Image: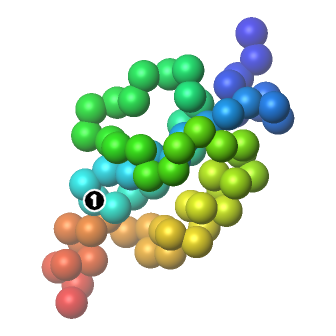
């Protein structure tokens, strides 16, 4: 069985949690609690581009708030 992230033709979602963290997520796996869809089903390249453009600071939102 191959890993879902290895499939170049697969469709993915971009998920975001309350901390502002993003995740590439295969469309056929249930979305875990605490995460919402930030980008609808797209190819892997588009999802990665979205994550790169929208998640510049990898720290959780709660950590950013305490550093200011």
Identify the residue at the far bottom of this view: 68
- Left or right of 17 on screen, residue 42: right
Residue visible at 60% across and 67% down in the picture: 52
**Left/right of residue 55 with respect to residue 4 in the rendered view:** left
Q: Nearer the viewer, residue 67 or 35?
A: 35
Q: Where the N terminus falls, by quadrant?
A: top right
Viewed as shown, does residue 64 lie left or right of 54? left
Residue at x 27%, y 32% (from the top left corner): 33
Give the image location of residue 17, x and y in percent: 32, 50
Name the spot of residue 54 as percent of width and height, x first. Answer: 50, 69
| Pointer 1 residue | 19
Q: Residue furthest left?
A: 66
* Percent position of residue 53, x then y: 58, 72
Residue lying at the far top in this picture: please name it: 1
> Residue 64 occupies which quadrant of the picture?
bottom left
Relative height, residue 55 to residue 13 (above, below): below
Q: Is residue 2 left or right of residue 20?
A: right
Give the quarter of the image for residue 68.
bottom left
Q: In which quarter of the view is residue 3 placed?
A: top right
58 or 45, nearer to the observer: 45
Number of numbered callouts drawn:
1
Which residue is pictured at 53% across the width and 44% down the height?
Answer: 40
Model colouring: rainbow
Numbered disc 1: secondary structure:
loop
35 up-or-down from 57: above or below: above
Q: Around disc 1, counting alpha carbons within 10 Å, would you say few (fewer than 14), some (14 to 19), or many (20 or more)?
A: some
Q: Residue at x 51, y 50 (%)?
A: 39
Image spot of residue 16 (x, y percent) = 39, 51
Q: Residue furthest right?
A: 8
């Amino acid at each position: 069985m191959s890993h879902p992230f290895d499939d170049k033709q697969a469709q993915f979602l971009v998920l975001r949690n309350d901390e502002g963290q993003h995740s590439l997520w295969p469309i056929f796996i249930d979305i875990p609690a605490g995460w919402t869809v930030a980008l609808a089903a797209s190819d892997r390249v588009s999802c990665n581009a979205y994550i790169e453009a929208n998640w510049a600071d990898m720290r959780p939102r709660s950590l950013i708030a305490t550093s200011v």
